[in-house]
Amino acid sequence: MRKKERFKGVIEFFEKNMPIAETELEYDNPFQLIVAVILSAQCTDKRVNLITPELLKRFPTPQKMAEVEPVEVFDYIKSCSYPNNKAKHLVGMAQKLIELFDGTVPDDVDDLQKLPGVGRKTANVIASVVYNKPTMAVDTHVFRVAARIGLSTNAKTPLATEKQLMQYIPLELVPKAHHWLILHGRYVCVARKPKCKDCGLTGICKYYSLNKPA
């Protein structure tokens, strides 16, 4: 099957079966989302959603978070992975947000990456989710699912996967497609043992064609 045909099949499947696809992180404004996305690195969204209410009650704005030491933030996030580094990143992010952008979360991917704790993936998430920009964030789920289905070929890095996905997905669908792939990887095409019997993409999936029962 040609890659273009595979993309067409994947898009048609998700548009029919997952017409609404959104982040599972809970937030009310761009600052809250950037905090949540930084915390979500190597941590489940479920855990992040348990942490953020009290954290953001104490630090509701960049100004409030920027004026404390990381150790104070650490007390609120110690149940997530890598809390020491994330506490430093959150305080540094808040400080830079004020210094460079007057406390407003920017919509430009390059500008977002000027903030501590914000790499390309996080920047793409913010630009896509908050500002509906056609940016494709490639996390472990997207990287895995794209390779298994055959949407990416021989991609060794998230950036290589991002470039291949962007080549075939219509720009207006990119923000939604990001969530399609994440959610499919989180609940169906899981890492250790994909749930192929529950998947509606087996007819076009490269992994399934190579591993289906005889």
Image: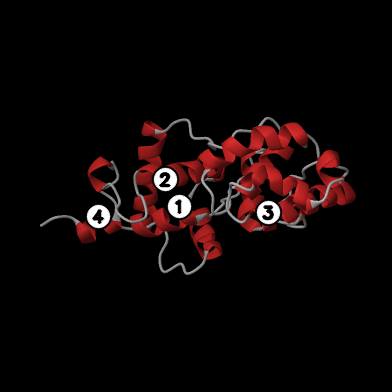
- Look at discs 1 and 4 and give the one toward the viewer: 1
Q: Nearer the viewer, residue 59 or 153?
A: 59
Which disc, if any, is residue 86? 3
Looking at the image, is mark 4 or mark 2 earlier in the sequence? 2
**Disc 4 from disc 3: Cα separation:** 38 Å
Looking at the image, is mark 4 or mark 3 earlier in the sequence? 3
- Look at discs 4 and 2 and give the one toward the viewer: 2
Amino acid carrying mark 2 in the image: Arg
Give x and y (percent) for residue 138.
53, 55
**Disc 4 from disc 2: Cα separation:** 17 Å
Which disc, if any, is residue 186? 2
Give x and y (percent) for residue 188.
34, 44
Which element type, helix, strand or loop, lies under badge 4?
Answer: helix
**Disc 2 from disc 1: Cα separation:** 7 Å
Amino acid carrying mark 3 in the image: Lys
Left or right? Give the position of 37 relative to 149: right
Q: Is residue 44 above or below residue 92?
A: above
**Disc 1 from disc 4: Cα separation:** 17 Å
**Quadrant in which residue 14 is drawn:** top left
Amino acid carrying mark 4 in the image: Tyr
**Disc 2 from disc 3: Cα separation:** 23 Å
Q: Nearer the viewer, residue 57 or 150?
A: 57
Left or right? Give the position of 4 relative to 59: left
Which disc, if any, is residue 127? none
Residue to which mark 4 is pinned: 208
Quadrant where the N terminus is found in the figure: bottom left
Residue to which mark 1 is pinned: 141
Which element type, helix, strand or loop, lies under badge 2?
Answer: helix
**Disc 3 from disc 1: Cα separation:** 21 Å
